[in-house]
Amino acid sequence: MSQGKGAPQDRATVARTLHWFWWVTKKRPFATFMAVFTSVTYTALLTYANTWVMGLIIDRIQAEPVAADKVFEVFTPYIVALLLVNAVGQACSKLQDWSVMQLEMNGNYHLARLCFDTLSNQSMTFHNSRFGGSLVSQTSRFTGGYSALVDVVVYSLIPTIASILCTIVLLWPASPLFVIILFALLTLYVVVAYTMYQRILPLSANTAAAQNKLSGVLSDAVTNILAVKTCGREDYERQLFDEADKEAMETERISMNAMMRRGAMTSTLITLIMFVTSIFACGGNAWYGISAGVLVMMFTYTYQLTMRFNYFNSMMQRMNRAVGDAAEMTKILDEPRLVEDAPDAKDLVVREGAIDFCHLSFRYHDATEDDYVFRDLDLHVAAGQRVGLVGRSGSGKTTLTKLLLRLSDVQGGQILVDGQDVSACTQQSLRQQIAYVPQEALLFHRSIRENIAYGRPDATDEEIREAARLANALEFVDRLPKGLDTMVGERGVKLSGGQRQRVAIARAILADCPILVLDEATSALDSESEALVQDALENLMRGRTSIVVAHRLSTVAALDRIVVLEEGEIVEDGTHAVLSQAGGVYESLWDRQSGAFLESE
């Protein structure tokens, strides 16, 4: 039953894959035309015209002996014809290669950009449920699938079709019966091969999925290699990799066995075709008066055609693999975006920075219908106000900031910035107005300079250094051999936690956004680093509407206002001085900490 249900979906995925491949191919119409034209011409000239001229030569020789001194006189037209046929055919061969390279370069560029745009515009919910390594692998397989399909179509499929047409045109006048029998057998071959191809298609998709999973497991282990080593879990990760590797090998084995069975059946049909051809070659002259030259053409054309069809098995296998490799990314390309700009979305314009959460209701995309994080929540943050969000783990602090950034969309209510509904604004303009500093600094494997200037790539060296100074980052940057040009490593691993955080704060300072979100920005730091970072944060918050998520309450004690969340509801709202004496949740948390930590979200 499952296979029956899965087949339409597989066919739909194939159709969508071919849609994307054709979409990118149409962008180069001249190269596409040249690929088809040169493939047909190359095949017609070098495979068929050559043999046809040789057949004429054989018939001329059989018709009447040619004297030695008359060879060039008699055969010069044939020699010139062969020269032209081969010269033009070779030129077409090179133009065929050129057109294929043009199509593949153009296709890989546009398809890679399509994948990048799709992935970069998907929601965090989408990315949180997938391996980054698998997405990279799927992108590579998608573009590679296009190149593989172009190769097989241009170098195999089109020449095969051209061979069929040439065989019909050249052999029909000599022996219509032979052509009818030949193509009846070839039609049977195609039907059998295609039927088996349909059965194998899901197997190739399974193989590609297993390979992508293997890439994801490898990427996950390599990305978190420090955790693997410090926990002594190399053997465990090797076991996970071995399991994924065996699964990939097993899917490959099943697919290979199915292909071998198909190959055995199609090879039997090819043998039958050549058996019929040999009978015609032997009796063609006696039965039908076919000349020797035509018999040579008949045998050669049929042999060439059967060789093409013999590779039909390999051709379908390569097409199958190309489409199967692209299947997972095709599904991702067609997956709806959980967070998308409205068609008439406008850029957010922030003049003051007031924020309003109005009757907010939200649940995660994969949660049950009644499992809401917020129900009818209201919160007003005045322009320029510094507000701390505190509460126990799971109270909704970080979720609220992510909703402000529209990393997820709400199911009810509105989030307003200076009276503008963020859902009616473009996501990019919204996030360009909000500087976000998370608990773990988000750094690229680039220089410190590039990381600081990420939000403002046009910043001058003086502005970058000033931002680094205000973030207390120059204290360590100037001690580095290459200073701001020092590469930080993947995710900033060459820097300490405090150094990474100060680089992230420098980036936020340089971006100079009117709204600031700090999500546990000091919770993972030692006391010395925290003091430097805290001082940098004071510089950063000055004159900005600031929302600070913290479980270390000393971080928010000096803020203008503290909001206490409990199970998605605001249970307290006031200054530290008031709340610490109010006998409520905040006082309980404050008394319990005494310098200790609460669980972070």
Image (spheres, rainbow, N blue to C red):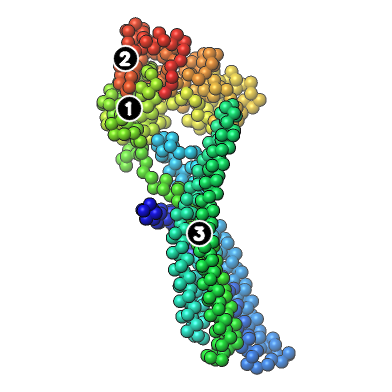
- Residue 235 is labelled as none
Q: Residue furthest bottom?
A: 64
Local secondary structure at mark 1: loop
Q: Give the residue number, with chain letter if any, for mark 1.
A: 373
Q: Position of residue 115 (x, y in %)?
A: 46, 45
Q: Position of residue 532 (x, y in %)?
A: 53, 15
- Name which residue lies at 32% across and 22% down: 567
Whether residue 520 is visible here, answered yes or no, is: yes
Vertically, is 94 above or below 343?
A: below
Which amino acid, mark 1?
Val
Task: Estimate how packed mark 3 is, as few (under 14), some (14 to 19) or many (20 or more) residues with alpha carbons within 10 Å.
Answer: some
Q: Nearer the viewer, mark 1 or mark 3?
A: 3
Residue at numbered disc 3 = 258
- Dot 1 or dot 3: first in sequence order is 3
Circle 2: element type: strand
Q: Is residue 84 left or right of residue 18?
A: right
* Quarter that holds the C terminus: top left
Q: Which residue is mark 2?
A: 573
Give how far across and how far down residue 34 sits, in percent.
51, 64
**Which residue sits furthest front?**
1
Residue at the (55%, 78%) spot, across then down: 275
Q: Nearer the viewer, residue 184 or 461?
A: 184
Image height of 94 relative to 286, above or below = above
In contact (CB < 8 Å): disc 3 and disc 2 = no
Give the mark nearer the N terminus: 1 vs 2: 1
